[in-house]
Amino acid sequence: MMRSWTLPLLFVLCGSFVAAGLLLSGSPGEAAGLLSAFLVLAGVNSPLVFPRSLGAAEAQRRSAVDGRPVVYWRPGCKYCIRLRMRLGRSARGLHWVDIWRDPEGAAAVRAANGGNETVPTVVVAGRARTNPDVAWVREQLARTR
């Protein structure tokens, strides 16, 4: 679990140190602006941006029942963040699996990507797509409704 919070914590710490230095040098406005930017980066890279992750077995079981895609992701992945942001509210309709928390999910991604843990990997009806187009993911989700 700690691994998924490493990057956000680094952003907060680095932002705090830089802001403290600017504050001590007499630039409170710059310090506040920079700290705000680092906090936004920390928030975007945190697991809080993503819907609650499931285990791979549970996500696959739910997908078999409702037909919704399973998205394998990991915190700090810019492509995962981009997919999540572009999906907007519809991202909640997908089954998300954090491969850093679930070894079975990481194994599923390696099996789909020739041994690489390349994410996001989206699985629909047993077929995997790596870093798919957002329009395709929306289309797959619309088919289940």
Image (cartoon, rainbow, N blue to C red):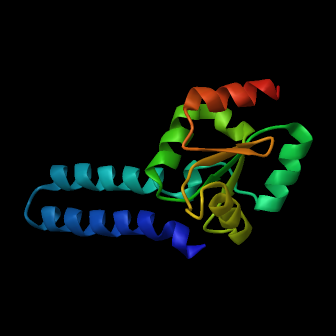
In x, y percent, where is residue 138? 65, 28
In which quarter of the view is residue 102 placed?
bottom right
The outermost residue toward the front is 114
| In the image: residue 137, left or right of residue 5 | right
Instruction: Pick the residue in front: 67 or 10.
Output: 67
Q: Which residue is rendered at x = 82% and y = 52% of the image?
A: 60
In x, y percent, where is residue 54? 75, 58
In x, y percent, where is residue 123? 71, 45
Q: Is residue 141 above or below residue 37?
A: above
In which quarter of the view is residue 2 placed?
bottom right
In x, y percent, where is residue 99? 63, 63
- Quadrant (top left, top right, bottom left, bottom right) of the C terminus: top right
| In the image: residue 143, left or right of residue 47 | right
Instruction: Pick the residue in front: 93 or 111.
Output: 111
Q: Which residue is rendered at x = 59% and y = 26% of the image?
A: 135
Q: Which residue is rendered at x = 32% and y = 51% of the image?
A: 36
- Quadrant (top left, top right, bottom left, bottom right) of the N terminus: bottom right
| In the image: residue 27, left or right of residue 73 | left
The outermost residue toward the left is 25
Q: Is residue 102 above or below residue 94?
A: below
